[in-house]
Image (cartoon, rainbow, N blue to C red):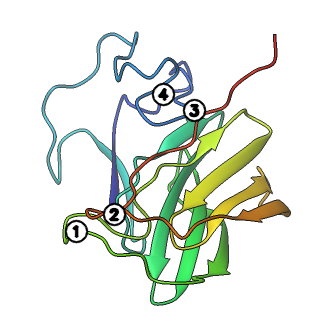
């Protein structure tokens, strides 16, 4: 279940395009956000989603995250204002990497440049979609040898 608090997704809110935000610090420049949350307090919407450990990322009117159901590795796109699922794309899990009980195959957060979304799954590799959910490319990677499992989220590097 993904819960979104009122104030976190206002129209003026900055995009949060990767794990820990625009510069990776985990700090937002937004002010006046609510400090109390609950079922009837400052809740904008809630949407059931499959299991995963990724942090949602925000791009314009979109919320993007990763999840897993059985052998399917899923990238989800939700409407930022309503929580409605706009699209859901999945690839088949190519293998089953070892991971700690508090980790899983959908731990890395996606990243976006506002035009495309890139998702990394340790059991598959890297995959890219348009913001409308059309697959652009895929790059199988691994296997990885990590005792606790992979949790590394991709970042975008710009050419200078």
Kindly identify which residue carries mark 2. Answer: 149
> Percent x, y for residue 142?
58, 66
Quadrant that contains the N terminus: bottom left
Left or right: where 101 falls relative to 31: left
* Picture residue at 73% right of the left edge, 34% below the top: 114
Kindly identify which residue carries mark 4. Answer: 10
Callout 1 crowding tier (Cα within 10 Å): few <14, some 14–19, many ≥20: few
**SS assignment at label 1:** loop
**SS assignment at label 4:** loop
Question: Which marked residue is nearer to the observer: mark 3 or mark 4?
Answer: 3
* Picture residue at 40% right of the left edge, 9% below the top: 29
Q: Are marks 1 and 2 in contact (CB under 8 Å)?
A: yes
Kindly identify which residue carries mark 1. Answer: 100
Q: Are marks 2 and 3 in contact (CB under 8 Å)?
A: no
Q: Which circle's residue, 3 or 4, is located before the other in the chain?
A: 4
What's the CA distance linking mark 3 and mark 4? 15 Å
């Amino acid at each position: 279940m993904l819960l979104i608090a009122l104030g976190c997704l206002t129209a003026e809110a900055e995009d949060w395009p990767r794990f820990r935000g625009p510069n990776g610090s985990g700090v937002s420049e937004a002010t006046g956000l609510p400090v109390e949350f609950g079922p009837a307090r400052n809740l904008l919407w809630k949407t059931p989603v499959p299991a995963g450990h990724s942090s949602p990322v925000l791009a314009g009117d979109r919320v993007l995250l990763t999840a897993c159901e059985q052998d399917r590795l899923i990238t989800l796109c939700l409407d930022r204002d309503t929580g409605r699922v706009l699209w859901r794309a999945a690839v088949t899990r190519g293998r089953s990497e070892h991971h700690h009980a508090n980790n899983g195959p959908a731990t890395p957060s996606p990243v976006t440049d506002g035009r495309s979304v890139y998702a990394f799954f340790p059991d598959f590799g890297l995959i890219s979609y348009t913001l409308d959910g059309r697959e652009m490319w895929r790059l199988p990677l691994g296997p990885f040898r990590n005792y606790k499992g992979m949790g590394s989220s991709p970042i975008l590097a710009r050419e200078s």
